[in-house]
Image: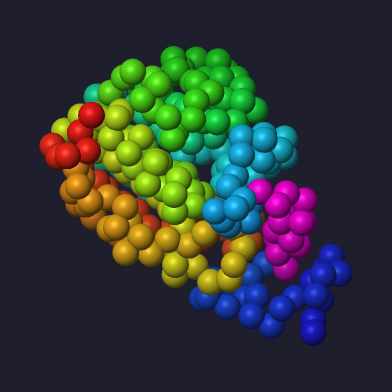
Amino acid sequence: MPETACGHRRHPGAASGGIPANPELTCDRRRFLHRVDAERPPTPTKPRTSGDFDALYAGAPPWDIGRPQPAFLELAKAGELHGRVLDLGCGTGEHVLMAAARGLDATGVDSSAAAITIAQSKAQDRGIAARLLVADALELASLHEQFDTLLDSGLFHIFNDDDRARYVHSLATATKPDARYHMLCFSDREPGDWGPRRITRTDIESAFTNGWRIDSIEPTTFTITIDPGAAHAWQVSITRTSGPDNP
């Protein structure tokens, strides 16, 4: 079996999936996955914790690309962000700062205090006014607020089945009819078992039923900092409707 430049043996299927592999970056991914088990797919017996993410943000998590995800940047350019914006699992703040820089009332929440600290530093350095809070996306009712646009870049796909249902209910408590929810998540089209759990179209359709209207589910890519530089993803737009889940 061939070896990479750093001495790791490369599995024969490592370069499958239609995206060419870079040996050096493959080594980076291996080191990352060995270093922090929190990037394993969540299970009902091992959900991620804020401590897991604090450990990740002590380094350089692969989703933290230092700029907005291209798919979300296009949404902003197209004028799809409006009203009060809530960035769910905002990490180091690129999307909430993107919204705030466009003059929107923007709030970012994340369970990781380490991520919020970095986001607050970015906001100060860039001279952008945004509200950044350590908060649990599963308990949005505690904010006692409602928002017009919700952004979710890589949060939905971390939840196990039980927490996924809690998350959708939590979203309902923070939105009113006609609010829009925009989501990027890993797709089942991504080969291998590294990183977060894969999400199918059926997973999305099953999660957002009463009180929601799915407007689009489109294949796209999720930019990452490790080999192969992008992962297959779904870009989803959903509208909150009046329904039995309305708080």
Tell me the chief SS of the magenta region: helix
- Against 15, is 246 above or below? above
**Quadrant of image for the C terminus:** top left
**Quadrant of image for the N terminus:** bottom right
The answer to if 82 sits in the magenta stretch is: no
User: In this view of the protein, which residue sits in the foreground, 194 or 225?
Assistant: 194
What residue lies at 40% left-to-right and 21% top-to-bottom? 142
- Where are the magenta residues, as a range? 23-38
Number of numbered labels in the structure image: 0
The answer to if 36 sits in the magenta stretch is: yes
Residue 239 figure quarter: top left
What residue lies at 16% left-to-right and 33% top-to-bottom? 177
Residue 35 in sight here? yes
Across and down, in percent, residue 197 comes to 52, 59
The answer to whether residue 78 is left or right of residue 234 is left
Residue 65 figure quarter: top right
User: In this view of the protein, which residue sits in the foreground, 198 or 75?
Assistant: 198
What residue lies at 73% left-to-right and 49% top-to-bottom? 36
